[in-house]
Amino acid sequence: VQLQASGGGLVQAGGSLRLSCAASGLTFGNYVMAWFRQTPGKERQIVASIYNRFATFYADSIKGRFTISRDNPKNSVHLQMNTLKPEDTAVYYCAAKFRGTSDYVYWGQGTLVTVSS
């Protein structure tokens, strides 16, 4: 299984970025997909997850600003990030867990998002 994240970069506060994650080697539709983020010295935290459009989760810190979506035919998941804040600066990881299970078992390599003030 491979998860390939992309789309990170440097953006000014208030700007937008769209992260993408391409998955291979798994039956994509059977997996809950998520984005996590991590800053130095802190634990990795979940940002958003999606199984289908009726089953999504968003962390309180990004509600109303970020939108997670998935394209099952293309085996991809996206995170549209709007109104970015300096505190959104982190390495963002995509992850996958089989539906009905608790642990994310597959992880991408991470993509760095830097938001300047």
Image: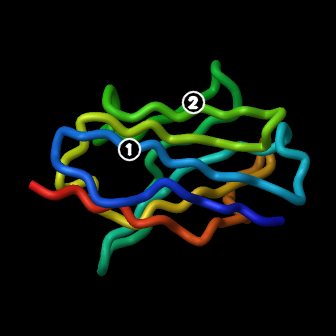
The mark that comes first in sequence, 2 or 1, is 1
Q: If the image is split into quadrants, where does the C terminus sit?
A: bottom left
Q: If the image is split into quadrants, where does the N terminus sit?
A: bottom right
Residue 7 coordinates in the image, percent (x, y): 49, 54
Label 2 crowd (10 A; few <14 / some 14-19 / many >=20): some
- At label 1, the amino acid type is Leu
Residue 27 coordinates in the image, percent (x, y): 90, 47
What residue would you read off at disc 2?
56
Mark 2 secondary-structure assignment: strand
Q: Nearer the viewer, residue 96 or 101?
A: 96
Vertical side of 32 occupied by 72: above or below: above
Label 1 crowd (10 A; few <14 / some 14-19 / many >=20): some
Residue drawn at point x = 70 percent, y = 54 percent: 96
Q: Nearer the viewer, residue 92 or 50?
A: 92
Q: How is the image coloured?
A: rainbow
Residue 114 shown left or right of residue 38 in the figure: left
Mark 1 secondary-structure assignment: strand
Residue drawn at point x = 29 percent, y = 59 percent: 10
Residue 111 coordinates in the image, percent (x, y): 48, 65
- At label 2, the amino acid type is Thr
Quarter of the view holding residue 53: top right
What residue would you read off at disc 1?
17
Return the residue found at the far left: 117
Vertical side of 90 occupied by 26: above or below: above
Cα distance, mark 2 to mark 1? Answer: 20 Å
Count of residue discs: 2
Residue contact between numbered discs 2 and 1, judged by CB atoms under 8 Å: no
Residue 37 shown left or right of residue 61 in the figure: right
